[in-house]
Image: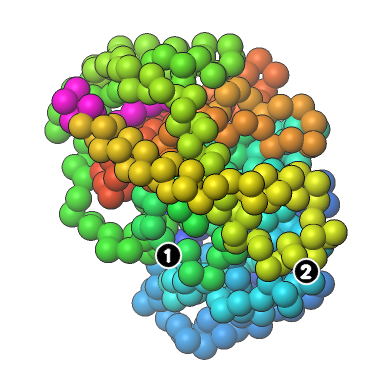
Amino acid sequence: MDKSLVRPRSLVREAASLRAGVPTPAVHVDRLCARIEQVDPLIHAFVPEPGRADRLQAEARALVARHPDPAQAPPLYGVAVGIKDIVHVDGLPTHGGSLLPPGVLAGPQATVVDRLRAAGALVAGKTVTAEFAGSAPGRTRNPHRPEHTPGGSSSGSAAAVAAGLVPLAIGTQTIGSVVRPAAYCGVVGFRPTFGRIPTAGVLPNAPSFDTVGLFTADLAGAALAAPLLCDDWDHAAGPDDGVNGGAWADGAPVLGVPVGPYLDRAGPEARQAFDRQLALLAARGLTVRRLDLLPDFEELERQAQTVNRFEMAASHADWFARFGDLYRPETAASIRHGRTVDPADRAAALRARTAFRERLAERRQRAGVDLLLAPSATGPAPLGLDSTGSAVMSLPWSFAGLPALSLPAGVTAAGLPLGLQVVGEAGADERLLALAAVLERVLDGA
């Protein structure tokens, strides 16, 4: 590993420094652009942008004019953010990782970008995505091992945070496109409850699943950004649980492990690391309960794919009819598959999803489980750039629309990161972040 490529930056510290006036936004932009120019040719996290430095300096001057006193500025004053290239940003074209003419894909600025800019953030640029947030990989390389995939489809956003190009980046997850690349790149990836961050202004993949999420170096960064981006954030929700001399301040959260065919999908490196993590958490006083939550996992996979392929074909019906020859083979195959799906099958799969949500919530409540834990991915980032890896470890939780995040959780003998996936209850994103901070402290202290 070239250690100069892996240098994640704390969003909390960077935001505090900028609001303290050190550095000024102009100096910060100079440093940002220098880092991108030095590192990005090696990992390709950002979509190339001629004139990036001039644009950002103009945005920095406008920001200072709006907020002459940094101490009174909004919480992300001057913070540079990467935006996945299926998310519309005023002044920047949207390519969607494709060869389609950008004007065809144009649209109003996304709500999430409105909220970032209202919070004082500067858009560092568009980050590389797999084509239309599907399975055809982009150019991005993993900063830990550039010959390995960074995951997908939010590949550029995860790699940009891991490489320290930006402390915050926006991605999207249909099935596993935030949690998996976060794990592969050794950063935090947070996928809120379905619908918690509006998708207005985001190119659709499968609207029944599409969720806007974010990447940060640590959980404190996610906790800073999430309330600014999510609808109706409850700052009073979620106890400040913690460890104090080995005792839990407000009762230890109970952890559920979904054993069976789902967990069997994890490879040996992921399972061994997961078992070590569970043993460590148990040794620190947490209750771990193994639950048979997903006995019908293969049927869930089939239902999720039915909805995903049908909706992807519908989302691209007009574009594909006009520009089908410009689509990459993987994306075109998914769309053609989606065209064969009977609408009645998709409706049945959505009804099954509702039943699954209800059954899962009831079983969790009966077992007294606060959080579900699983590996974030089937293993470390695979060698090669022809695949973004498997999203299967995120599938049931994305299918149900539950909030989930990936915590960095050690590395393999080869130095590739692994992630621990933490899944909360629908709508309880605040509590998920609060309790996950407990786990982060235990794992970091190991």
Left or right, 159 with reference to 435 = right
Q: Residue at x 68, y 71 (%)?
A: 105
Query: From the viewer's perspective, is residue 285 above or below residue 327?
Result: above
Give x and y (percent) for residue 413: 66, 15
Q: Residue at x 37, y 11 (%)?
A: 279
Residue with the mark numbered 2: 322
Badge 2 marks a residue whose secondary structure is helix
**Amino acid at the residue labelled 2:** Arg
Q: Is residue 163 visible?
A: no
Q: Residue at x 41, y 37 (%)?
A: 397
Give x and y (percent) for residue 201: 54, 70
Query: From the viewer's perspective, is residue 216 above or below residue 200?
Result: above
Query: From the viewer's perspective, is residue 129 above or below residue 367?
Result: below
Badge 1 marks a residue whose secondary structure is loop
Q: Nearer the viewer, residue 76 or 156?
A: 156
Tell me how the rendering is colored: rainbow
**Amino acid at the residue labelled 1:** Pro
Left or right, 87 with reference to 18 = right
Q: Nearer the viewer, residue 114 or 413?
A: 114
Q: Is residue 392 visible?
A: yes
Give x and y (percent) for residue 298: 49, 24
Magenta highlight on residue 371 = yes
Within 10 Å of disc 2 (Cα), the crowding (few <14, some 14-19, many 20+) is: few
Q: Nearer the viewer, residue 101 or 286?
A: 101
The label nearer to you, 2 versus 1, is 2
Magenta highlight on residue 301 = no
Q: Earlier in the sequence, mark 2 or mark 1?
A: 1
Region of the chain picked out in magenta, as a range: 363-374
Residue with the mark numbered 1: 198
Callout 2 touching callout 1 (CB < 8 Å)? no
